[in-house]
Amino acid sequence: MSGLPITRRTMALATSAAIATALASAPGKALAEGAPIKIGLTTDLTGIAATYAAAQVNAVKLAIEEINAAGGIKGRKLELLVRDSQLKPALGASLTRDLIVREKIDYLIGPDASSVGVAVSGVAKQYKKVVVMTIPNTPRLVGELFHKYFFTIVPSGTMLARAMAEGIGKTNNSIAFIGGDYEASHQAIQYFGEWLTKVNPKAKITAQQWPKLGEPDFTPYITQLISAKPDIVFSYLWGADLIAFIKQAKPYGLFDKTKFATLLFLDDLKALGDDMPDGIIGQMYAPPFGTNSPAMAEFIKKYQAKFNSFPSDWAVMGYDGMRILADGIRNAASMESDAVAEAIEKLKFDGLQGPLTFRAVDHQGNVPSFLGTTGKVAGLPFKGLVDIQRIPAESVWPTPEEILAQRKDK
Amino acid sequence: MQITAKSLAGFAIVVFILVVSPYLTDESNLFVLMDVLIAILFATSYNLVLGGAGLLSFGHAAYFGLGAYTVALLQAHLGLPMLVGIALSPIVAGVFALLVALLTVRLSGMYFAMLTLAFAQLIYTVIAEWYSFTGGDNGIPITVPDYFFVTAHYFYLTLGIVVGGVLLLWLIGNSPFGAALHAIRENPQRASFVGLNVKLYQVAAFTISGALSGVAGALSGSLHQMAFPSMLYWTESAQPVLMALAGGIHAFFGPAVGAAIFTVLNFFVASYAGYPLLVFGVVVLVLVMALPEGVVGTFRRWLIRRRDAGSRAAPASRDARP
């Protein structure tokens, strides 16, 4: 055991070396006049939501490129710094904090997963940094976690669940639910159920199925949904889960036996291609084909030319989110977070999906959501939605009283 | 094993560097250092079970996460401040570790690992699903008092607790209790013939380890102002195992070095490189293939070999020193 003293000393040296490495890295740089305005983006480039994050990063880059090409803001260029939070909230908080204190970023644009959104919003609050969220949509962000530097242009979980109840609740009396076993689905069915009693008191949720996220075998759920004989199935499956479910449910004839309404991302339409059955009711956040305007057509063209892929909902919101942040910086009296937050609150933004403003109580942008039926859309290489119904935010978002009550409960 | 002047001096130097680091470096590096310190406490307390008692636990993320939830839930439901939560975290995490240990130590090897994993997943599931109590899978916020919003203040809190925890583990490792654990690790049958109550020692080691992992989790949750169910998820349980193996499980400071390497690497890879999981996989592969005894174990072996070679060549040199 005579070797131990040396070991301990070397241990100490090794530890100090590791610490020194950490200490030696880049010191903070002072912000000079004319230096670029730094935008920080922490998002989940690794994991099941990586495609969404990639589209978000692309769209934000595209918006920044255009703003810089037009001379930047107040004579300063925009610079984007991207970090990969890997769906880990703690890592998201660390990386966002590091962007603020080490890289001295000026403003934040939103992350990907809602859990990381919660973490990023907390850091933004602590360091008084404006953050515009373009993917996370848990109602807690506008509820008890709200602060004045937070803005969102994503239809919240509450808005989507109510829009779904508006869309399918009036004409169907027995509704079966299937959703991944996690917070967003539980909230969805709760808000859906509450709104359902308003639009159709006779309607009942007759069955609920909770497969775990990433479930490979949906067979037992499919047979139970069929045997429940509902008028319609309301699904809160998305991504790989929805794709697997649809592929497995087809041979059982689920889509012939009952109507099917689901949350739907453009990425899933792309992935399913011709395997996507026609006649499914899809609810979408911000599909490019949901808005027929020259601005949207122009955006689709630019995005396709640059990234060689059709823009998804996340690209639409990422692009608008970045331009909203830019307009806020441009209109603000100073570069300070308070001034920029105030400017965004007053903004009348001309977005890809139409005019957009934020309300004071929760900084929720009045963004629409969309319901339609799956089918062939001219000019799309995969299936899209036809008979699209645009549901304005104002018809489904929680009233300011509801928001305040939600905050008081916590 | 005894506390020697050299080892104490080495430890004191590291602690001194850490104490003055808020004056040497900027805020951003302090945050990385805090993550490193927390990982050091987690990995070192984990190693009391792996290197100390020779039990491969694969569920320590549960105790880590329980520590964070202790702070968050006491605050959310009883309005108790953060420091009270941190102080109570070892008790809560320790009680759960004790219960799990009582049910698992009768098994050995792979069966023990699988059962600790199963219990950890059970705790994870309860926390992730019990929406009304834990806030479900998007986590529950922790409000930090204004005083600890100053980074240096929270840094000193973290440093104090981590140094205290590591010293405690060091004392435990060098006590008769630690010697008995080593005997059990090397040969449980012989240890029981000598008269040691093998199961009792293993339960005690597991409980202490779980309790201190809980403290690490409480510090981590308070640092990130949030407790998340993913802190308890089974993939997180791999972290202390990898850190301990990378650093070396048979050297007391091995897991600490492993923790520092992994945390700093993870941070910079996630910040500046693509494909973090690929980079990680390659690092682990290289460590396992090239340094089976871990960084510290291999380094120690090399030093001993060099010294032995040196003392053979000049046997009088050591004694000739003034």
Image (cartoon, rainbow, N blue to C red):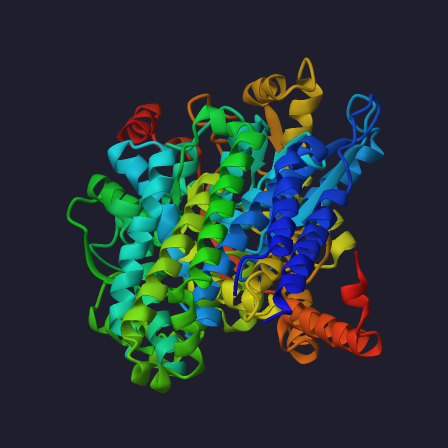
Q: Quadrant of residue A210?
A: bottom left
Up-down: is B258 above or below A82? below
For image coordinates 25% across by 72% down, the residue present is B103
Q: Quadrant of the C terminus of chain A?
A: top left
Query: Where is residue A255 drawn, in percent x and y?
Result: 36, 70
Up-down: is B236 above or below B38? below
Answer whether residue A228 is visible to the viewer in this image.
Answer: yes
Query: Where is residue A5 drawn, in percent x and y?
Result: 63, 62
Query: Where is residue A384 drawn, in percent x and y?
Result: 54, 59
Seen as rendered, the residue at the extreme left is: A202
Query: Where is residue A117 drawn, in percent x and y?
Result: 50, 43
Up-down: is B242 above or below A363? below
How many numbered markers are drawn? 0
Q: Quadrant of residue B115?
A: bottom left
Up-down: is A380 above or below B24? below
Seen as rendered, the residue at the extreme top is: A333
For image coordinates 79% across by 21% down, the residue present is A74
Q: Quadrant of residue B141?
A: top left
For image coordinates 81% across by 26% down, the residue present is A76
Answer whether residue A287 is visible to the viewer in this image.
Answer: no
Query: In terms of depth relative to the viewer, which is nearer, B306 or B207?
Result: B306
Query: In terms of depth relative to the viewer, which is nearer, A383 or A329?
Result: A329
For image coordinates 55% across by 63% down, the residue present is B252
Q: Quadrant of the N terminus of chain A?
A: bottom right
Position of A259 with respect to B270 (left or right) is left
Position of A199 with respect to A328 (left or right) is left
